[in-house]
Amino acid sequence: MTQPPQRAGLFLGLVLLLVACSGIAGSTKPPAGACVRTDASNTVTLTANNLQFSTACIEAVVGKSIVIHFTNQEAAPHDVAVYKNSSKKQQIGRSDIVTGPNASTTLTLPPQLPGQYYFECTIHTAMNGSLVVRGDAPAP
């Protein structure tokens, strides 16, 4: 039995809509090997230049505070805000706004559970990335 073209098109559209909507915000995995890892103290340096962050992915370890030393290398103002996910409904922390060149601030986040978080410049939201926390969650 063949379906009229209109029904087939409607069915295909519905399937595509379901596939597009099935993802969870912030669930996209960063490319392998693309993350900048924190050092032994769970600290990382992040810079802004040409309306871009120096990396789109930061990898930290579970169980320790996460420290982001942020330097703005250009005259445009920037900050760094970290959220539970890209919906931006739950902010974990936000740095001061700094205007460069070479102005700096430090953002210290409380220890986070393993998972993928979202960061962005709240002034230039196209500047964003993932904070990936790896390791085993501490026992309760």
Image (cartoon, rainbow, N blue to C red):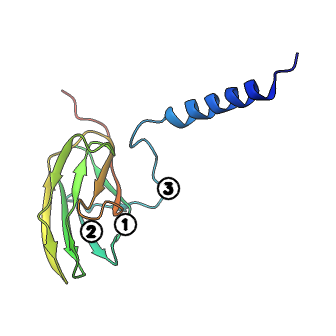
On screen, residue 85 versus residue 2, left or right, reads: left
Lower position in the chain sequence, tag 3 or tag 2: 3
**Quarter of the view holding residue 95:** bottom left
| Residue 65 in view here | no
Q: Which residue is mark 3?
A: 31
Q: Which mark is residue 55?
A: 1
Question: Label 3: few (<14), some or many (≥20) within 10 Å?
Answer: few
Say if mark 2 contacts mark 1, CB within 8 Å. Answer: yes
Q: Residue furthest top?
A: 1
Amino acid at circle 2: Leu
Residue 135, horizontal then vertical, whole percent: 32, 43
Disc 1 marks which amino acid? Thr
Q: CA distance from mark 1 to mark 3?
A: 12 Å
The residue lying toward the viewer, choosing from 26 and 63, is 26
The residue sitting at 28% across, 49% down in the picture is 61
Which residue does the numbered mark 2 point to in the structure image? 46
Position of residue 23 in the picture relative to residue 44 (left or right): right
Asked whether residue 99 appears in the rendered view, the answer is yes
Spatial CA span between label 2 and label 1:
7 Å
**Residue 108 position within the rendered picture, expressed as x and y whole percent measured from the top left:** 13, 56
Q: Amino acid at mark 3?
A: Pro
Q: Residue at x 36, y 62 (%)?
A: 126
Q: Position of residue 88 (x, y in %)?
A: 27, 45
When the figure is inspected, residue 36 is found, relative to residue 83, above or below; the finding is below
Q: Label 2, secondary structure: give it.
A: strand
Give the structural element (helix, strand or loop) at label 1.
Answer: loop
